[in-house]
Image (cartoon, rainbow, N blue to C red):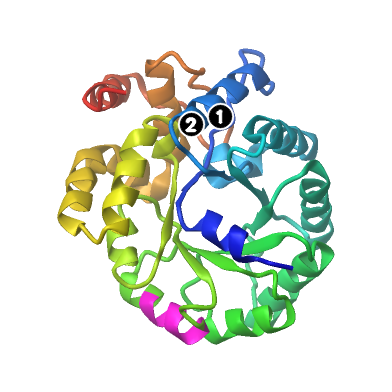
């Protein structure tokens, strides 16, 4: 199996779409499709349904599958589809197999949320998923600073479809060491903490970054990628400065309003409702105008 097209697809702005909800709390599939088309028309080339910005842990199994199917349908070959999977192994495997059958290209494996995770157990968990879908690329989502890079290499020794990493530990030096211990050229390294961390992670080996902001302003995220690919860190940091207030709102209080701020921006643009599901909550009225003002300044 030639994995090079999948690797090339990962080295990009990896969009994490929101999941819009209707007034009755159900999925708003029409709004979801419209948001996906807007991103695709804006130049997005890879999307991750069922990511954290899509409120993965607040969706039912049936909703996750609906989100996967409509994303693959809207992508229609215009963009690669990297489906988020997780929870217990049978659930993660079933969702990965569904992603394969729906026509997705890759799966991103959410970091296990069990309070007791051994490094051997981490390998076993990902191996079970990767072996179930050998025809799909597999991308572990790593948030654990204690995981050793050598363990990722060990996983890939037995599962060659493990082709990339969404690395989301907020420590650029640790990322640099982890990548070099795992094999910097062996995997595609995606900066998993979005635009604010992208420049520092690109400086030490990343070639892609995730984005929730791309739901709101695809051109802003893609302009940062263009600058980083060119090695123009001055231009990249100008984008960084532009979006910093927005991303700081998302990151405040351990990212309590990470999804909420993005949905509030979309609501200000009239693109979807601001509704989120617990454990997220709707942004307080006092902060809504602040978000709208930030977005207005981007000329989206």
Q: Which residue is mark 2?
A: 39
Residue name at image x 48 percent, y 39 percent: 44
- Is 32 left, or right, of 90 in this rendering? left
Identify the mark at residue 36; answer none if there is no mark.
1
The question of residue 284 being in magenta is answered with: no
**What x and y, as percent, mark residue 27?**
67, 23
Query: Residue drawn 42% across and 54% down?
Result: 209
Q: Which residues are magenta?
A: 176-182
Q: Picture coordinates of residue 213 (x, y %)?
A: 39, 38
Answer left or right for 152 relative to 284.
Answer: right
Q: Is residue 282 above or below residue 200?
A: above
| Magenta segment, prevailing SS (helix, strand or loop) | helix
Q: Which mark is residue 176?
A: none
Report the residue at 39% width, 16% height from top: 269
Q: Secondary structure at mark 2?
A: helix
Q: CA distance from mark 1 to mark 2?
A: 5 Å
Along the viewing direction, whichever of 172 and 219 lies nearer the viewer: 219
* Residue 130 vs residue 9, the one in the foreground: 9
Residue 281 visible? The answer is: no
């Amino acid at each position: 199996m030639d994995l090079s097209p999948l690797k090339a697809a990962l080295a990009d702005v990896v969009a994490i779409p929101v999941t819009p909800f209707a007034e009755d709390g159900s999925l708003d599939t029409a709004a979801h499709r419209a948001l996906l088309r807007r991103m695709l028309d804006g130049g997005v080339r890879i999307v991750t349904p069922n990511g954290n910005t899509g409120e993965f842990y607040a969706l039912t199994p049936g909703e996750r599958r609906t989100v996967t199917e409509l994303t693959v349908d809207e992508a229609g070959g215009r963009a690669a589809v990297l489906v988020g999977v997780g929870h217990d192994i049978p659930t993660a495997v079933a969702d990965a197999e569904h992603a394969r059958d729906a026509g997705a290209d890759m799966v991103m494996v959410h970091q296990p949320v069990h309070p007791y995770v051994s490094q051997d157990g981490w390998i076993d968990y990902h191996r079970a998923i990767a072996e179930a879908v050998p025809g799909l690329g597999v991308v572990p989502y790593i948030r654990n600073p204690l995981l050793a890079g050598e363990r990722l290499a060990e996983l890939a020794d037995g599962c060659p479809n493990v082709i990339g990493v969404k690395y989301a530990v907020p420590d650029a030096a640790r990322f640099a060491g982890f990548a070099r211990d795992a094999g910097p050229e062996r995997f595609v390294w995606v900066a998993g903490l979005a635009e604010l961390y992208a420049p520092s992670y690109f400086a030490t080996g990343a070639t892609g970054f995730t984005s929730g902001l791309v739901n709101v302003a695809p051109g802003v995220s893609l302009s940062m990628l263009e600058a980083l690919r060119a090695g123009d860190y001055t231009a990249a940091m100008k984008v960084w400065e532009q979006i910093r207030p927005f991303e700081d709102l998302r990151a405040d209080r351990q990212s309590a309003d990470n999804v909420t701020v993005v949905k509030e921006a979309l609501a200000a643009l009239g693109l979807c409702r601001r509704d989120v599901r617990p454990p997220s909550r709707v942004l307080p009225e006092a902060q809504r105008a602040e978000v709208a003002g930030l977005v207005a300044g981007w000329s989206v």
